[in-house]
Image (cartoon, rainbow, N blue to C red):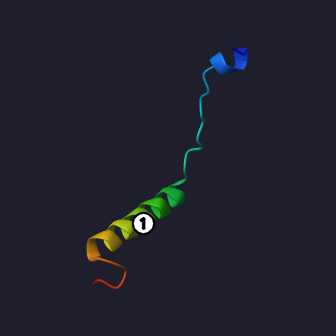
Amino acid sequence: MAETTTRRRVRHAHRPTESERQAAAAALQRALDRRDNGGSTGH
């Protein structure tokens, strides 16, 4: 085996900013609301 395959790869994800985190939370909430309400017009 090559030496590069034995080295463990570590992914360093950047820490999301507060606005990015809020946008992701809002998108997740919209997706959950759509699922629970049977569609975007299911209110």
Is 12 placed above or below 40 here? above
Is 26 placed above or below 40 here? above
Q: Nearer the viewer, residue 21 or 33?
A: 33
Q: Which residue shows up at 72% across the image and 16% down it?
A: 2
Task: Residue type at mark 1: give it.
Answer: Ala
Q: Quadrant of the N terminus?
A: top right
Residue 28 coordinates in the image, percent (x, y): 40, 62
Residue 15 coordinates in the image, percent (x, y): 55, 45
Relative side of 9 to 18, left or right: right
Residue 37 coordinates in the image, percent (x, y): 28, 76
Give the quarter of the image for residue 35.
bottom left
Q: Which residue shows up at 64% across the image and 16% down it?
A: 6
Q: Which residue shows up at 60% across the image and 22% down it?
A: 8
* Residue furthest front as drawn: 1
Is 38 placed above or below 12 here? below
Q: Nearer the viewer, residue 6 or 12?
A: 6
Q: Quadrant of the C terminus?
A: bottom left
Q: Which residue is mark 1?
A: 26
